[in-house]
Image: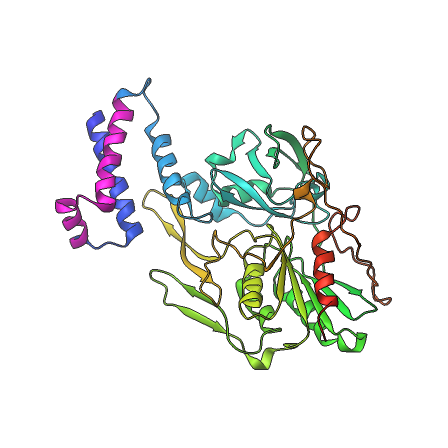
Amino acid sequence: MPKSLKISLLAVSAILLLTIFLGANLRGVQAAVAGDDDGAYRQMRIYGEVLRHIQTDYVEDPSMKTVTNGALRGLLETLDSNSSYLTPEEYKAFKSHTAAKGSVGINVAKRGYYATIISVVPGSSADKAGLSDGDVIESLGSTSTRELSVASINILLDGAPNSSLPLAIIRPRKSKPEKLELTRTVLAPVPTAEVFYESNTIIYLKPSVIDKEHVQQVETRLKNMKQMGSKKILLDLRDVSTGDETDGLRLANFFIKTGTLATLEGQKVVKQTFSADSGKVINASAPMVALVNHGTAGPAELIAGALLDSKRADLVGEKTFGEGSELKTFEMPDGSAIILSVAKYRTPSGKKLQDEGITPSVAVASDAEFGVAGGDDDDEDAPVTTPATTATPTVNSSKPAVPVAKASASIDDQLNRALDLLKNKTA
């Protein structure tokens, strides 16, 4: 096939893809091609010209399939962290993938070009290796995550129990990738943590995931808090990044009696408003504080946004990750596919969760950010914070003790600040 014909076909394919993406009709396409010197179709003509130069002027004859796949991947990933392009091979693996029993315990998204860790499952091999939210996964095996969609990355993270996963990690404040080898293991579900402070007057609750089971656990503990003598609530949403948005809204409703909890809207998705149901409230008046950090994402952010905007609770910690969209998969004629965010969640005040996140009302940096739990070896002058007091929990004697913080050997500034706020609130 002549090179000029190849280039023309590539350009036409790209235009067709963008046409599907924009939802344009045939008349709109004809008008755009005929007279629109601005906007998307002008850019497609430029794209065709770039393809021609790559094909004819690059130092060697390139693989146009690789070039086009890269362009399509870049097109989708510039939209947000969840939108992805899958090659025919990747989409086939995506459709046949089932959640494997073995996991390294990492939840990821893409920020910029590479995969970023949102949160780490406690007790997993990733947790034992000291990985945490904000760490960048440069590569999985020999493949750069820059070349992989989020869907493909999740497939590679799972595997058979006891199998190994080599990867390269770039930690904050370190310039060189660190090579690690994690072991996939079968992770037992982590139940909702329940701890009591201040002679049982403060109940601390931490669901590890926002799903039906863990929300039910929170509900049961809230209904039993009075008989334990608890009058104040501390909800820990730090490093909670998985679950279901419907369950997140249900949990938020436990604390909020009236008003909007969140909205969902897209270009072709009619706006939905999720309102509090007074019949589902458990405790709408107890003094309350919620903890958030960079690992708070998705359904947990819906909860945090609802609590903050309704002035139901103070938020203590760091800005959340910024993830909250409804995804839809579109199959392409060549067997490839695009995963597209078709609607995005907003807080009651209209703040978009996706990429923006939630800024807490009381900002407190994590210990790891200040180098308490393993800073850069090359930076000996990294600042360290030391609060005046350290929170001491009392645990329900009828239940096993549950660790409050991931790094129990370090001081938890965020937890202490939250407890200080609650102590000063009148029940």
- Residue 289 is situated, as x and y percent measured from the top left of the image, at 66, 65
- Along the viewing direction, whichever of 231 and 150 lies nearer the viewer: 231
Q: Is residue 145 magenta?
A: no
Q: In the picture shown, does residue 214 fall above or below 141?
A: below
**Relative depth, front residue between 302 and 289:** 289
Outermost residue toward the right in this view: 397
> Compared with residue 161, is residue 397 higher up or lower down, i.e. above or below?
below
Quadrant where the C terminus sits is bottom right
x, y percentage for residue 238? 65, 55
Task: Identify the main secondary structure in magenta.
Answer: helix
User: Hey, which residue is sitting farthest top in the picture?
Assistant: 59
Q: Quadrant of the N terminus?
A: top left
Q: Residue at x 78, y 71 (%)?
A: 201
Does the magenta-highlighted stretch encompass residue 53? yes
> Is residue 280 in view from this perspective?
yes
**Residue 401 sits in which quadrant?**
bottom right
Residue 392 at x, y percent in the picture:
82, 58
Count all numbered tags in the image, as a single digit.
0
Left or right, residue 391 beside residue 275: right
**Outermost residue toward the left?**
34
Task: Decide if residue 144 is on the left or right side of residue 129.
Answer: left
Q: Is residue 12 visible?
A: no
Q: Nearer the viewer, residue 257 or 359?
A: 359
Residue at position x 42%, y 69% from top?
272
Q: Position of residue 56 (x, y in %)?
A: 25, 22
In the picture, measured across the screen, residue 9 lies left or right of residue 316, that is left
State the scheme by which the image is colored: rainbow
Q: Residue at x 33, y 62 (%)?
A: 268
Find residue 43 and report its image quarter: top left
User: What stretch of residues is rendered in magenta?
Assistant: 27-56
* Residue 175 vertical position relative to residue 31 in the rendered view, above or below: above
